[in-house]
Image (tube, grey):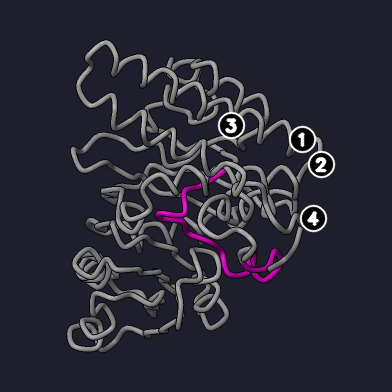
Amino acid sequence: MDLSVVIVNWNTRDLLRDCLQSVFAGLGGLEAEVFVVDNASEDDSPAMIRREFPEVRLIQSPDNRGFAAGNNLALRRVSGRHVLLLNTDTIVHGSLIPDCVAWLDRNPSVGVMGPQLLNGDGSAQPSCSAFPSLRNLTMQLIGITRIGRWDSYRMTGWDRSEERSVDVISGAAMFVRGKAMAEVGLLDESFHFYGEETDWCRRFCVKGWRLKFVPIPEITHFGGGSIRRLNHRRDVMLTEGTTRLHLKHGSHAAAVVCFTILALHNITRAAFWYAASAAGRPGAIARARHFACVVAELPKAWPSMPERATNS
């Protein structure tokens, strides 16, 4: 088996249909298997899969277990030499899938690679980044990351026209070498929605595997998908996941500093948008209320079960 494709779905039936159509159209001559893990959707996604894509290996979870645990349900069953983790809100174009498999076969020291992702308008998407270190988070807090050429965290000052070694590949479209995954282990299920691919990438790096962005075109990643249903909880979960990363790969003190930086980020944004709403800026009050809700739920964002590095 050349490739195992793993897609986790939660209430994105129509996006999933388009994604699966593009995947099957783009496999070329590869020997491949496609898994869809459905995280207890309520939009008849499983029925659509059975009706329109009988070749898909459907795994139904009785509840929404999140990104890491959902992917792991399939990753325990894959048989491909390589694995592609793919979001439902993506469209695969052309020969990208076989081209990426061929690239991995030519570069045996690379454990994880990310292809070129585009936004819906065709612009390049920042689909890889540096690790969210305390330095990088501080730069984000004070606004330096808004200046592209200084944004070493999200790498927005780079046009992604050449190969580059990176710290983190986006889980929206991530090719993983099966041999490397067997050594590193599965995704850490203590991460529910954010931080899981960052943690995984860090573990591949620690084991000596290289991570590469490769500008093989292309996948459209529309963004949103399941995340649109999370509202302000998205930012609460982002704070929790990022803090957990520092607990796991740093120290308790580093996690406290990380949590403080992210709390300040949300507090200052709430204050800014309330001030903007008082000045009559359109849409400002909605943004202010968003960040106010995040701030109100920050006590829930401290990880309940801090852990050191794990293989699951």
**Nearer mark to the viewer, of 2 and 3:** 3
**Nearer mark to the viewer, of 4 and 3:** 3
- Tell me the SS state at disc 3: helix
Q: Position of residue 212 (x, y in %)?
A: 53, 45
Q: Mark 2 is on which residue type?
A: Ser
User: In the rendered image, which residue does mark 4 sit on?
Assistant: 308
Query: Any magenta on residue 218?
Result: no
Residue 218 seen by the camera: no
Q: Name, please, the residue furthest toward the top.
A: 279
User: Which tag, 1 or 3, sits closer to the chain's start?
Assistant: 1
Q: Which residues are magenta?
A: 168-186
Q: Position of residue 39 (x, y in %)?
A: 41, 74
Of residues 26 and 61, the one nearer the viewer is 61
User: Which tag, 4 or 2, sits closer to the chain's start?
Assistant: 2
- Tell me the SS state at disc 4: loop
Mark 2, other Cα within 10 Å: few <14 / some 14–19 / many ≥20? some
